[in-house]
Amino acid sequence: MVKINPVTICVVTLLGCYSVLADNPCLKGPPVPKNAAECCVTPFLVEPSAFMACHSKWIGQTKRQMAIEGIPRGCCVAECVMNSTKLYSDGKIDRDALTKLYLGSTKTMAPEWKQITLDAIDGCFKMADSIKAEIDAGALLTPAFDGEQICHPISGTILACMGMTLFAECPAKLFTVNEDCNKLKSYHSKCPFL
Protein backbone atom coordinates (compact mmCIF):
# COMPACT_ATOMS: atom_id res chain seq x y z
CA MET A 1 0.00 0.00 0.00
CA VAL A 2 1.33 3.44 -0.91
CA LYS A 3 1.83 5.81 2.00
CA ILE A 4 0.20 9.15 1.25
CA ASN A 5 2.59 12.00 1.85
CA PRO A 6 0.64 14.84 3.46
CA VAL A 7 3.12 17.46 2.30
CA THR A 8 2.64 16.24 -1.23
CA ILE A 9 -1.11 16.48 -0.85
CA CYS A 10 -0.81 19.91 0.75
CA VAL A 11 1.44 21.27 -1.91
CA VAL A 12 -0.90 19.82 -4.50
CA THR A 13 -3.55 22.10 -3.00
CA LEU A 14 -1.24 25.09 -2.79
CA LEU A 15 -1.09 25.75 -6.50
CA GLY A 16 -4.56 27.23 -6.19
CA CYS A 17 -3.16 29.79 -3.79
CA TYR A 18 -0.57 30.97 -6.28
CA SER A 19 -2.18 30.48 -9.68
CA VAL A 20 -3.44 33.78 -10.95
CA LEU A 21 -3.55 33.38 -14.71
CA ALA A 22 -6.23 31.38 -16.48
CA ASP A 23 -3.73 30.27 -19.15
CA ASN A 24 -1.32 28.90 -16.57
CA PRO A 25 -0.46 25.36 -17.75
CA CYS A 26 -0.17 24.22 -14.12
CA LEU A 27 -3.89 24.82 -13.59
CA LYS A 28 -4.74 21.80 -15.71
CA GLY A 29 -3.02 19.55 -13.21
CA PRO A 30 -0.57 16.71 -13.74
CA PRO A 31 -0.48 14.97 -17.13
CA VAL A 32 -0.97 11.56 -15.50
CA PRO A 33 -3.36 10.20 -12.86
CA LYS A 34 -0.53 9.37 -10.45
CA ASN A 35 0.03 10.53 -6.90
CA ALA A 36 3.59 11.75 -6.33
CA ALA A 37 3.85 9.39 -3.34
CA GLU A 38 3.43 6.48 -5.77
CA CYS A 39 6.65 7.61 -7.45
CA CYS A 40 8.66 8.66 -4.41
CA VAL A 41 7.74 8.78 -0.73
CA THR A 42 9.31 11.96 0.64
CA PRO A 43 9.75 13.32 4.17
CA PHE A 44 6.59 14.94 5.53
CA LEU A 45 5.59 17.60 8.03
CA VAL A 46 2.22 16.35 9.31
CA GLU A 47 0.22 13.16 9.37
CA PRO A 48 -2.41 12.79 6.64
CA SER A 49 -5.32 13.24 9.06
CA ALA A 50 -4.05 16.66 10.16
CA PHE A 51 -3.68 17.77 6.57
CA MET A 52 -7.07 16.41 5.53
CA ALA A 53 -8.81 18.35 8.30
CA CYS A 54 -7.26 21.57 6.96
CA HIS A 55 -7.93 20.61 3.35
CA SER A 56 -11.60 19.91 4.03
CA LYS A 57 -12.03 23.23 5.82
CA TRP A 58 -10.27 25.47 3.27
CA ILE A 59 -10.33 23.84 -0.18
CA GLY A 60 -13.50 25.66 -1.25
CA GLN A 61 -11.88 29.03 -0.63
CA THR A 62 -8.65 27.89 -2.29
CA LYS A 63 -10.51 26.98 -5.48
CA ARG A 64 -12.20 30.40 -5.59
CA GLN A 65 -8.85 32.14 -5.09
CA MET A 66 -7.41 30.38 -8.14
CA ALA A 67 -9.28 32.77 -10.44
CA ILE A 68 -8.13 35.96 -8.70
CA GLU A 69 -5.45 37.93 -10.52
CA GLY A 70 -2.79 40.06 -8.88
CA ILE A 71 -0.60 39.53 -5.85
CA PRO A 72 -0.54 35.85 -4.81
CA ARG A 73 -2.96 35.21 -1.97
CA GLY A 74 -2.06 33.29 1.15
CA CYS A 75 -3.12 29.68 1.34
CA CYS A 76 -5.31 28.93 4.34
CA VAL A 77 -4.83 25.18 3.87
CA ALA A 78 -1.09 25.66 4.41
CA GLU A 79 -1.54 28.10 7.27
CA CYS A 80 -3.94 25.66 8.94
CA VAL A 81 -1.34 22.89 8.59
CA MET A 82 1.35 25.12 10.08
CA ASN A 83 -1.00 26.14 12.91
CA SER A 84 -1.75 22.49 13.65
CA THR A 85 1.95 21.96 14.30
CA LYS A 86 2.33 25.28 16.15
CA LEU A 87 5.00 26.29 13.60
CA TYR A 88 3.31 29.50 12.48
CA SER A 89 2.77 32.75 14.37
CA ASP A 90 2.36 36.34 13.20
CA GLY A 91 3.68 35.82 9.68
CA LYS A 92 6.68 33.78 10.76
CA ILE A 93 7.48 30.09 10.68
CA ASP A 94 9.59 28.52 13.40
CA ARG A 95 12.38 27.14 11.24
CA ASP A 96 13.98 25.11 14.03
CA ALA A 97 10.70 23.38 14.90
CA LEU A 98 9.95 22.79 11.20
CA THR A 99 13.39 21.24 10.76
CA LYS A 100 12.85 18.99 13.76
CA LEU A 101 9.49 17.73 12.42
CA TYR A 102 10.82 17.07 8.92
CA LEU A 103 13.92 15.33 10.23
CA GLY A 104 11.75 13.24 12.53
CA SER A 105 9.98 11.87 9.47
CA THR A 106 13.31 10.90 7.90
CA LYS A 107 14.36 8.61 10.77
CA THR A 108 12.80 5.53 9.18
CA MET A 109 13.72 6.51 5.63
CA ALA A 110 16.87 6.08 3.55
CA PRO A 111 19.76 7.97 5.21
CA GLU A 112 20.29 10.36 2.29
CA TRP A 113 16.93 12.01 3.02
CA LYS A 114 18.38 13.78 6.05
CA GLN A 115 20.78 15.94 4.04
CA ILE A 116 18.33 16.39 1.17
CA THR A 117 15.76 17.67 3.68
CA LEU A 118 18.21 20.03 5.37
CA ASP A 119 19.25 21.43 1.99
CA ALA A 120 15.60 21.84 0.95
CA ILE A 121 14.77 23.73 4.15
CA ASP A 122 17.74 26.02 3.64
CA GLY A 123 16.85 26.66 0.00
CA CYS A 124 13.15 27.24 0.68
CA PHE A 125 13.77 29.73 3.46
CA LYS A 126 16.29 31.59 1.27
CA MET A 127 13.75 31.68 -1.57
CA ALA A 128 11.06 33.01 0.79
CA ASP A 129 13.45 35.71 2.00
CA SER A 130 14.12 36.71 -1.62
CA ILE A 131 10.39 37.34 -2.25
CA LYS A 132 9.59 38.77 1.20
CA ALA A 133 8.04 41.95 -0.23
CA GLU A 134 5.55 39.93 -2.31
CA ILE A 135 4.75 37.64 0.62
CA ASP A 136 4.19 40.63 2.91
CA ALA A 137 1.97 42.30 0.29
CA GLY A 138 -0.14 39.16 0.07
CA ALA A 139 -0.68 39.26 3.82
CA LEU A 140 -2.14 42.77 3.53
CA LEU A 141 -4.76 41.96 0.89
CA THR A 142 -8.41 42.52 1.66
CA PRO A 143 -11.09 39.90 1.00
CA ALA A 144 -12.02 39.64 -2.68
CA PHE A 145 -15.31 37.82 -2.02
CA ASP A 146 -17.74 37.39 0.87
CA GLY A 147 -16.31 35.09 3.50
CA GLU A 148 -12.74 35.03 2.17
CA GLN A 149 -10.27 34.61 4.99
CA ILE A 150 -6.92 36.30 4.41
CA CYS A 151 -4.07 33.98 5.36
CA HIS A 152 -0.40 34.89 5.35
CA PRO A 153 1.40 33.57 2.23
CA ILE A 154 4.54 32.40 4.08
CA SER A 155 3.04 29.00 5.00
CA GLY A 156 2.06 28.17 1.43
CA THR A 157 5.35 29.48 0.08
CA ILE A 158 7.42 27.22 2.34
CA LEU A 159 5.21 24.13 1.98
CA ALA A 160 5.00 24.44 -1.82
CA CYS A 161 8.75 24.83 -2.06
CA MET A 162 9.44 21.89 0.26
CA GLY A 163 7.09 19.57 -1.60
CA MET A 164 8.50 20.43 -5.01
CA THR A 165 12.11 20.32 -3.85
CA LEU A 166 11.89 17.03 -1.99
CA PHE A 167 10.13 15.36 -4.91
CA ALA A 168 12.66 16.76 -7.39
CA GLU A 169 15.56 15.55 -5.24
CA CYS A 170 14.23 12.04 -4.71
CA PRO A 171 17.27 9.72 -4.79
CA ALA A 172 17.37 7.70 -8.01
CA LYS A 173 17.31 4.41 -6.10
CA LEU A 174 14.04 5.44 -4.42
CA PHE A 175 12.27 6.89 -7.44
CA THR A 176 9.89 4.59 -9.32
CA VAL A 177 11.06 4.79 -12.90
CA ASN A 178 8.21 4.47 -15.36
CA GLU A 179 6.62 6.70 -17.97
CA ASP A 180 3.98 8.16 -15.64
CA CYS A 181 6.41 8.95 -12.84
CA ASN A 182 8.88 10.51 -15.29
CA LYS A 183 6.11 12.73 -16.68
CA LEU A 184 5.06 13.66 -13.16
CA LYS A 185 8.61 14.58 -12.21
CA SER A 186 8.93 16.80 -15.28
CA TYR A 187 5.58 18.45 -14.55
CA HIS A 188 6.41 19.08 -10.89
CA SER A 189 9.76 20.61 -11.78
CA LYS A 190 7.67 23.61 -12.93
CA CYS A 191 4.34 23.27 -11.15
CA PRO A 192 3.51 22.86 -7.47
CA PHE A 193 1.37 19.91 -6.47
CA LEU A 194 -2.39 20.44 -6.97
Image (cartoon, grey):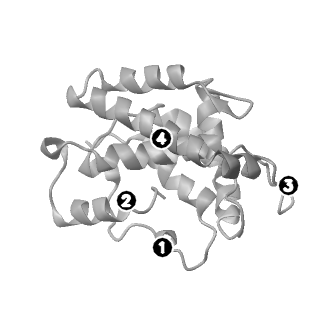
The answer to whether one can see residue 74 in this image is no
Report which residue position mark 2 lands on. 188
Q: Spatial distance from mark 2 to mark 4, Cα to Cα?
A: 16 Å
Q: In the rendered view, would you say 11 is above or below 45? A: below
State the residue at coordinates (54%, 39%).
Answer: 51
Q: Are marks 1 and 4 in contact (CB under 8 Å)?
A: no
Q: Residues within 10 Å of mark 3 (few under 14, many from 20)?
A: few
Q: Spatial distance from mark 2 to mark 1, Cα to Cα?
A: 12 Å
The percent position of residue 41, horizontal first and vertical second, equals 29, 41
The percent position of residue 81, horizontal first and vertical second, equals 59, 36
Amino acid on which disc 1 is placed = Lys
Label 2 vs label 4, nearer the camera: 4
Q: In the rendered view, would you say 147 is above or below 171? A: below
Amino acid on which disc 4 is placed = Cys
Of label 4 and label 3, which has the lower sequence position?
4
Amino acid on which disc 3 is placed = Thr
Report which residue position mark 1 lands on. 28
Report which residue position mark 4 lands on. 124
Residue 142: assigned label: 3
The percent position of residue 116, horizontal first and vertical second, equals 30, 34
Of label 2 and label 1, which has the lower sequence position?
1
Of label 3 and label 1, which has the lower sequence position?
1
The secondary structure type at the circle numbered 2 is helix
